[in-house]
Image: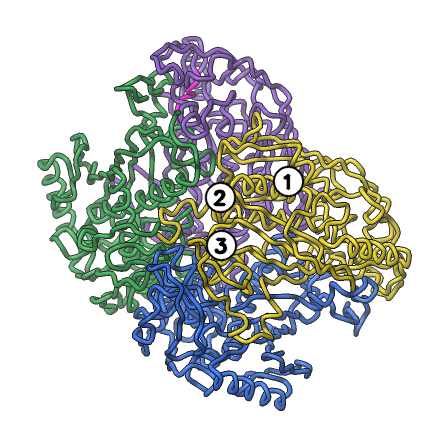
Chain colours: A yellow, B blue, C purple, D green
Amino acid sequence: MSTLSGDTLRLTLFGRSHGPSVGMTLSGLPAREPVSLPALQDFLGRRAPGRSPLSTARREADIPRFLSGIKDGVTTGEDIAAIIENTDVKSNDYPSLTTVPRPGHADYTSYVKYGRIEPGGGPFSGRLTAPLCVAGGLCLQILRRRGITVLSRILSIGEVDDQGDLTAPTCEKAFPVVDDAQGEAMARAILQAKAQGDSLGGVIQCRVLGLPAGLGGPLFDGLESRLSAALFAIPAVKGVDFGSGFDAARLRGSENNDPFALETGRVVTTTNHCGGILGGISTGMPLEIRVAVKPTPSIALPQRSVDLKAMTPTTLQITGRHDPCIVPRAVPCVEAAAALILCDALLSNGKEPHHGTD
Amino acid sequence: MSTLSGDTLRLTLFGRSHGPSVGMTLSGLPAREPVSLPALQDFLGRRAPGRSPLSTARREADIPRFLSGIKDGVTTGEDIAAIIENTDVKSNDYPSLTTVPRPGHADYTSYVKYGRIEPGGGPFSGRLTAPLCVAGGLCLQILRRRGITVLSRILSIGEVDDQGDLTAPTCEKAFPVVDDAQGEAMARAILQAKAQGDSLGGVIQCRVLGLPAGLGGPLFDGLESRLSAALFAIPAVKGVDFGSGFDAARLRGSENNDPFALETGRVVTTTNHCGGILGGISTGMPLEIRVAVKPTPSIALPQRSVDLKAMTPTTLQITGRHDPCIVPRAVPCVEAAAALILCDALLSNGKEPHHGTD
Amino acid sequence: MSTLSGDTLRLTLFGRSHGPSVGMTLSGLPAREPVSLPALQDFLGRRAPGRSPLSTARREADIPRFLSGIKDGVTTGEDIAAIIENTDVKSNDYPSLTTVPRPGHADYTSYVKYGRIEPGGGPFSGRLTAPLCVAGGLCLQILRRRGITVLSRILSIGEVDDQGDLTAPTCEKAFPVVDDAQGEAMARAILQAKAQGDSLGGVIQCRVLGLPAGLGGPLFDGLESRLSAALFAIPAVKGVDFGSGFDAARLRGSENNDPFALETGRVVTTTNHCGGILGGISTGMPLEIRVAVKPTPSIALPQRSVDLKAMTPTTLQITGRHDPCIVPRAVPCVEAAAALILCDALLSNGKEPHHGTD
Amino acid sequence: MSTLSGDTLRLTLFGRSHGPSVGMTLSGLPAREPVSLPALQDFLGRRAPGRSPLSTARREADIPRFLSGIKDGVTTGEDIAAIIENTDVKSNDYPSLTTVPRPGHADYTSYVKYGRIEPGGGPFSGRLTAPLCVAGGLCLQILRRRGITVLSRILSIGEVDDQGDLTAPTCEKAFPVVDDAQGEAMARAILQAKAQGDSLGGVIQCRVLGLPAGLGGPLFDGLESRLSAALFAIPAVKGVDFGSGFDAARLRGSENNDPFALETGRVVTTTNHCGGILGGISTGMPLEIRVAVKPTPSIALPQRSVDLKAMTPTTLQITGRHDPCIVPRAVPCVEAAAALILCDALLSNGKEPHHGTD
């Protein structure tokens, strides 16, 4: 199912890339929360295609039409439903794909599970991340109002790394990095790969500031479990770690443990290898997430595949409009997924009478 | 909550490390499934403490007592409930911990959320992985009967890597690696760290053979989302990736895409960078998971912390029995978590009339 | 939330009576199930308003637009999303209702929970039963193909009872009763109440034939629990019982117990006081449900209420278009709710390898 | 599954009547809630067997052993786990039941679903209501501390009705009625039925005072849906209605609508036909529930049944210890089920910033 069930929030995504529209329902948001539709539209614009030579030429206005839950600029407390029309659908971009699966795509697994390959990827399409960003964008506004900021950036594209420290939003930038020089190098690498009919992947960093300590819970209720489940739902994400993550596996306890200290009467850790999560619960230090995104499977180079009807080997050449690198457009999706989970944890936390260390 | 809700299976873990017992309820397993309790006990033995100089001296028989769901060596189709008594509890191993949180532990977040630090970690204790392994061990037997084998191994401990290829079970070995020479090097590294009052982490690889194509689903229903949610519930896990995972972020599409081919009339991929999952659905190729485990936070070296009552800085020296490296005992936990999710996906798949590419 | 979560099926309803549209998403239906849209439209027509002098004059085409999940007349196995546009909205029918709650309506509780009274009842509107009937109508077709027939009828309207035995569908009739003479008496009673500015309630009977034994489960998984939860979601339903139900409370065990017997080698009960459910599980005998529907709260007679802003008593006179009796239009809603739960139980049962008494 | 999933609370029941023990896990209760174990034990005593000539001679101490979640007389905020040992099990009370289902019991459906008849009813046994009452008893204490009182009484046994108005607790009484004269008549009727080898059913009324307005939600989130799902999980319950319920079906709108009025500045209704629920949400007036309980199926009189192995008709005579009327012991179960749902609604409501009519 395309449903994310939190303790307080429940999100359902629906529709198809090549159908008339996509949409979402989100229940559990409190009433009386101000919603800025322009700010939401800006956020959606960061994910929308057709904005730069680095992304697909497909253009979508991506303007959500709200059916319920928002009235006079505030949430009503009821479930929120929104629909986004698909304005620029070209199914004939995918003529030859009916029985020959594209390597790296969900075509083959879709064929196995549903008995056919749907143009545009059907339920697997990145298009479904548009309504995901509608829901996440609303949660981002609710978090921000509570002093919680979700920062994100591209950490690497292919072999190009951005060494800068993430301290401020990068969303204003055409290319969301800290070190703009590296950002230009990344852009060049993408255009070069595109010229070669190839594609690139990358790593996205997400850092959340202002999160109170005490969100989440033990075992299956842990923040890592919940965040990773939402992040891996983003197409092309193949890895997620927290804090030092995979690097921590090479550290010693004496290096990886974060010592506790007092800072203006507040408990802090002098390092943050745990990424702001201990025992599945937020420590109050910045939340640190890394997300690995694979290179876009749609490439112009000829690829070996199989005709699933004839059961004969064949060579496949993909035409149509595709992103040579999905990473930049995946950045707001990572923010959206994180915001949904953290907003759910924050709202659910409100149920408990006891917070803080008093 | 300590509940994992799949499409068909629902697991609830309960009890505490320093209470009278821990246990689990598991609902959704089909009726008439043979259960080998000796095989289950062997599996639990791999997780149980006190079996080697590499692990804590705490000894637990870890013999589950089944209250329901298993009768005359088969499942009854009802929910399965089991309890494991805590036989070797020494709360006074944790005298000084009441208000001084151990770095890297859930002590501080537990204090924030629940207002106190519970000896032994309370709900966060690795002890809860014993009932997790009871549930996962049952699922492993059900999977094996259907031709699905879950292999796992230690890929690295600290800086020591095992380069061997995982093709056979390693569970018979005292140290579950492919290359025993590297296994000895790992053991030496652990004992050395222990001698230094320190600890080590590592990476675990899990490979699942024989999984049919078509398990899982798009978006939030994807295998990566479900597997990662279960794997991050294991204490000390800080990173999870699938197939090439984080490495894929540095590859090009032409390198990372797995070409389709025919092998004795069956559709295969000639490489497996996707780790056997495309669009959240199994491809029928081996499932590839890597899990990063942080070094055990309990170390003998003195560490800086804070007295949360006095709100004064202090130095903490942990006594008591601890694992210098939790990775070996975490291996069966990874198998158990994976088996639970895959068994749920397999049983849920049974609901659909259409499987395969006919 | 407006989400019904079964073991296999998940339904989400969204939209508002006086918004642009209402809709639903339904996930979990198997792939390759033929869907007759004309038959679905006929079913929706039974619920739709404006078809007779007995119902509101509001007219709605109630034609669902499917966004996903149905292709070429069959289900695809993906989640099904459908939208129904609201074509005939007259918000100014509800001018005076903004702060004066209508007795018997959700106006007051809506005001308490959401801080305002929404025209048309907002999330509480009977309009949301249109997408409910889309989902239920699809399930009815799936059940029928498996030999399961959902019959229903009006058992009583006000003081007029229909004594006939329910053995055949009544859906062809303008007034779904067994004894048409009593049906005419009911219609007369409704028109008389309408002429007096009043309204009537009634009881609906639902009988399901062909259900296999073994559906459902113990305790919270019982068919009564699941069916009642879905049936009480229909606005105006205030009572639900099964088999002899409330009458059974006056019987003796020797009268209420249904003796087992053999009929052409099949186990049957010679009576059916249990309504086809024992221990929450279907017996294979007809399922018997009774649903009590209260009289429509919207009546033309002046009623005492309170102005919630001024906090002063006032008298309320409701204008606009209303049903003098909602019972006839509630009949397909009862079928839809029952079909959803039974289809979920049937599909979930498919997960178990062992059925029947072999 | 034996799991009840609320918005905030999740309850899992496990164990078997004739196994070593039964138990429950309950997650979602807030931290720092005082728990009176003596008061809980008194509550469990009302459900426990062997306390009067009216109930089975089976005696159970029913003393829960808490494994987690309660410490020093308060909840810890973690999940609560409790186990109740089965001390008085006599499986040989059920020698002849292995293949001959008892009429009115779950024996036959259990045989169909699980392939055998379990002594004592297995998962269907009323014994599982002991842990249900542990969970519900804890919720009752939390509700009472917030000024919410759950009153209940026997409304009728067989043909004997109690006409008194329920305004005070009846739990102190050996027979929980308002009119003690009628209570004695009920007791006589039960003993007479018992002497005749027969059994009786009855109706239970539950009234909840002090419930704030605004709990619950529209459609599937309505209080009626949630309460009925929990109440029908109690074995032998066959009907549930709210307020005037089935009687409302015979009223006119002008009779059934509850006029709003002001009482000392508070909005009230001058009647309460809706039973304190409009649109699935509490009105702030008393909650009114009626629950129909069928006569105990275990009777001493010979009954016609079928041998499911031989597939031959047979006559069955049940021996062993049974309740001639389960209604008195079901009264606390109804309170427990109601308290669980209302406590969940109350705690979930806490998530919303806006309460009341300001």
Label 2 marks a residue whose chain is C
Q: Residue at x 62, y 74 (%)?
A: B205
In this rendering, do the residues under marks 3 and 2 share a single chain? Answer: no
The amino acid sitting under disc 2 is Leu
Q: Quadrant of residue D288?
A: top left
Q: Does the magenta-highlighted stretch encompass residue C82?
A: no
Q: Give the x, y percent position of residue A114.
A: 70, 54
Q: Which mark is residue A134?
A: 1
Label 3 – label 2 distance at C-alpha: 58 Å
At horizontal 39% and vertical 80% (from top left) the residue drawn is B321
Question: Answer yes or no: do the residues labelled 1 and 2 have beta carbons within 8 Å?
Answer: no
Residue A312 marker = none
Q: Nearer the viewer, residue D204 or B82?
A: B82
Chain ID at mark 1: A
What residue lies at 47% left-to-right and 48% top-to-bottom? A7
Report the residue marked by disc 2.
C209
- What chain letter is assigned to the residue under label 3? A
Q: Are marks 1 and 3 in contact (CB under 8 Å)?
A: no
Where does label 3 land, which residue?
A284
- In the displayed structure, A7 sits above or below B163; it is above
